[in-house]
Image (tube, rainbow, N blue to C red):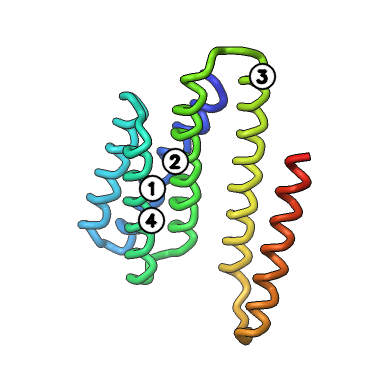
Amino acid sequence: MTYRVLILVVSILIAPVALLLAYGLEQYWVGSVAALGLGLWGWYGLKKVQSAWSADLFLAGVVLLVTIGGLLGLMTYLLFPALLGALGAWDLIRFQRRIEHSPFSESILKIEKRHLTLLGLGLLGGGIFAGVMLTVRMQISFSVTLVLGVILIVSLGEIIRLLRN
């Protein structure tokens, strides 16, 4: 089992289990059943031919359940891992579909390793930002938010430019 498949399995399991716990602990049984159905859909997509629309549907379902859970006031520390797991699974399924059609070579292994590294960094960064947002409670004005957003966009652009070189 390659690292890509292992990470894909873990990502597909994290999303529905976290949603199942979030809805189940608050006794929203319809949401728990929807999370279980979503997990079965993701597992079916893993075992059968993974298509892009199947991954898109999985991600959309998780985003819908996370959004509804946020509106219902469910535990956000269970909703964020579900969203991060769904994003990881969505990305890896689409990545796997792209590399299946290319001939095997050593460069494919290098591309896969780089992709997994960047995906891991992205998910780790998302998790850290989510953890910071869960612990820090402050009110800032719109103009400060706008300035921080512009700084973030410029910084991310520079990081992407740096990684490409």
Estimate the spatial distance between the alpha carbons at disc 2 and disc 3, rounded to whole Å. Answer: 23 Å
Residue at which label 2 appears: 90
Instruction: Please give the name of the residue rendered at 73% of the width and 40% of the height, measured from the top-left corner.
Output: 164
- Residue 88, position in %: x, y? 50, 42
Residue 89 in the image: state x and y as whole percent.
45, 39
Mark 1 Cα within 10 Å, few/some/many (few <14, many 20+)? Answer: many
Q: Position of residue 90 (x, y in %)?
A: 44, 41
Amino acid on which the number 3 mark rests in the picture: Ser
* Tag 1 residue: 59
Q: Which residue is mark 4?
A: 63
Sequence-wise, the earlier of marks 2 and 3 is 2
Amino acid at the residue labelled 4: Val
Q: Earlier in the sequence, mark 1 or mark 2?
A: 1
Category of crowding for the residue at label 4, using alpha-carbon neighbours closer than 10 angstroms: few (below 14), some (14–19), many (at least 20): some
How far apart are labels 3 and 4 at the CA level? 34 Å
Q: Earlier in the sequence, mark 3 or mark 4?
A: 4
State how far apart marks 1 and 3 are (Cα).
29 Å
Q: Which residue corresponds to mark 3?
A: 107
1 or 3: tag closer to the N-terminus: 1
N-term mark: 2 or 4: 4
**Proximity of marks 1 and 4: CB atoms separated by less than 8 Å:** yes
Q: Is residue 56 above or below residue 3?
A: below
Please name the amino acid that badge 2 sits on. Answer: Trp
Residue at image location 38% in from the left, 47% down from the top: 59
What is the CA distance from the residue labelled 2 to the residue labelled 4? Answer: 12 Å
Q: Do the numbered discs 3 and 4 sit on residues whose CB atoms are within 8 Å?
A: no
The reply to whether discs 1 and 2 touch (Cβ–Cβ < 8 Å) is yes
